[in-house]
Image (cartoon, rainbow, N blue to C red):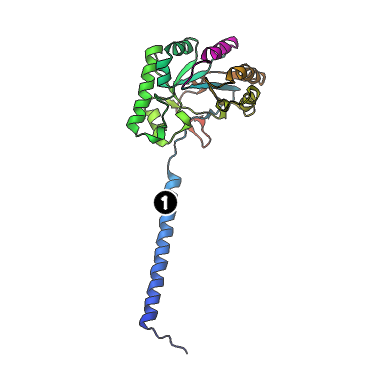
Amino acid sequence: MRFIILTKKNILIILVCLLFAAGTAAIGLDTATKAVQTASTDRKIPIYCVDTKKKVCSISFDAAWGNEQTDTLLDILDENDVKTTFFLVGDWVKKYPDSVKKIYEKGHDVGNHSSTHAYMTQLPRDKMTKELNDCSSEIKKLTGKSPTLFRPPYGDYNNDVVETVNTLGMYCVQWNIDSLDWKDPSADRIVQNCVSKLDRGSIILLHNGAKNTPEALPKIIEAIKTKGYKIVPISKLLPKGKYTTDIQGRMIITN
């Protein structure tokens, strides 16, 4: 039989090993706890598209800076009997009030795109609220109606942004089809970008100041209609009632 003689040195080594093992276990437990907490966090996702069985979709335009092509786009929409949604920045509204009135009078949605086209996630809630309210106020002065649709500039959002928008009685709306017209591709490429991923409940993103959008727009409309889809403003696309959004941002009615 062999006996182990515990010297002071051996005891010290054993204590160090026990302390290391206990520390490792504590770190593992803390990591696991944080993972569970993160997984249980309720992530707020804006509306990217709508869950519907109908062959219906929406075209939207963001307007933040120039205005050279707005009239042309409105004429094309008139010629094709199509109503869309324009998300307007408050500064743009102040600069081009006649265009705002024209958009509204022609039956298109007038949505809120913030007051100054700021990165909303970089703002505290009180400043987010001011961005939203200031833009809505400018739009209401010209149209008589407060917007019910909001699109975050740059598509930039987090839970605070979505919750602030909803608290003010508006829908937070993104898009599931990006035309990429702001990169100035050819008109045919813009059409392909819009139509290749078209599905029921899709929301298409265009811009009022993109170089080749006026040339592409008639072709986009024709291609969508050829596929048997109806184009409606986003306000007509969104179903009424309580809803949730899935991980892809698909709006699903829950009541």
Q: Residues within 10 Å of mark 1 (few under 14, many from 20)?
A: few
Q: Tell me which residue sits at (65%, 20%) in the image.
A: 223
User: Of residues 2 and 77, which is closer to you in this image?
Assistant: 77
Q: Amino acid at mark 1?
A: Lys
Let me know if residue 204 is in the magenta part. no
Residue 254 visible in the picture: no
Determine the secondary structure under disc 1: helix
Residue position marked by numbered label 1 in the rendering: 34
Q: Position of residue 244 (x, y in %)?
A: 47, 32
Q: Position of residue 246 (x, y in %)?
A: 51, 35
Q: Tell me which residue sits at (41%, 72%) in the image.
A: 17
Report the residue that reaches farthest toward the bottom. Answer: 1
Q: Quadrant of residue 4?
A: bottom left
Report the residue that reaches farthest toward the left. Answer: 126
Let me know if residue 80 is in the magenta part. yes
Q: Position of residue 167 (x, y in %)?
A: 37, 28
Q: How many marks?
A: 1
Q: Position of residue 35 (x, y in %)?
A: 45, 50
User: Of residues 86 and 245, which is closer to you in this image?
Assistant: 86
Q: Tell me which residue sits at (43%, 14%) in the image.
A: 96
Report the residue that reaches farthest toward the right. Answer: 226
Residue 17 to residue 244: above or below: below
Q: Which residues are magenta?
A: 65-81
Q: Tell me which residue sits at (40%, 86%) in the image.
A: 5
In the picture, measured across the screen, residue 166 lies left or right of residue 224, that is: left
Residue 189 visible in the picture: yes
